[in-house]
Amino acid sequence: MSVSVIKNILSSFEPIGLKDINDVKLMDRVDTKFSFNFEDLESFLSSLKEDYQVLVIDESPISKYNSLYYDDKVLTAFNDHQRKKPNRFKVRFRKYVYSNIQFLEVKHKVNGRTVKTRIPSDSIPSEMNEVQEAFVHETGIHGQLKPSLRNKFKRITLIQKNKSERVTLDFDIRFEWKDKEIELSDIVIAELKQSKADRNSTFYKLMKKNIIRPMKLSKYCIGMILTHDKENLKYNRFKKKLLFIKKIQKNVA
């Protein structure tokens, strides 16, 4: 299935623009993630168009994102996730390609909620300036951070018509570090973003109907495992998830 087929399906959705989604930024939220084969996206979207609008930027319902993650020399962000630490951070610069804006973003996972704070950035730098370092430290992160992973992907953003939730659908996911470039082909990572968990969500019920269970899946952690020297990473917790991803890619999950 091609992206053009997906765009054709999305053309039947009611569009919504960036200026109209201020009520659904959900910077403090509960996230529920799912993953499935790209071939399933066509039927899933067709089931969602009555209840969701699609975010359209620069006349396109599919956006491009470029990210550069930062971590410290002992990879605290990665290892805290590996250890299931309930209070943890991720730091990244992200470029929203079609709207041509960049932010330095800090995601704080605490007590099952995701709290995101961010400041504008003129670029995606290979080194933080003093203002950016001060912002990161104010969020509660200490120590010196440096780039650790590049990530690119395409995203569809759906907005529930009553503005209570967002669904992001990421695909064509690529990871880059030094001389390695890895693509997660044929896979979609979906994220249901709500102010509080609600299993009556149309999207949640669609996943349940298709026996797709929630899964805690971090693009950052998966990318680190795929592109970095595994001898320097502890990733036992992620081995089953890597196998699950391979099954999805073969469409046998």
Image (tube, rainbow, N blue to C red):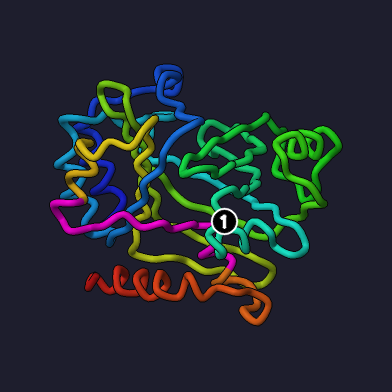
> Residue 163, percent across and down?
32, 22
The quadrant in which residue 148 appears is: bottom right
Residue at screen point 63% across, 74% down: 233
Looking at the image, which is closer to me, 43 or 115? 115
Q: Is residue 164 above or below residue 102?
A: above
Dot 1: within a 10 Å radius of its alpha carbon, few (fewer than 14), some, or many (20 or more) residues?
some
Q: Is residue 30 above or below residue 85?
A: above
The residue singled out by tag 1 in the image is 85
Left or right of residue 186: residue 67: right
**Count the marks: how many?**
1
Residue at screen point 77% across, 55% down: 146
The span shown in magenta is: 208-224
Tell me the element at label 1: loop
Type of amino acid under label 1: Lys
Looking at the image, which is closer to me, 197 or 162? 197
Q: Is residue 118 above or below residue 250?
A: above
Left or right of residue 19: residue 148: right
The quadrant in which residue 186 appears is: bottom left
> Residue 227, percent across and down?
59, 71
Residue at screen point 67% across, 30% down: 119
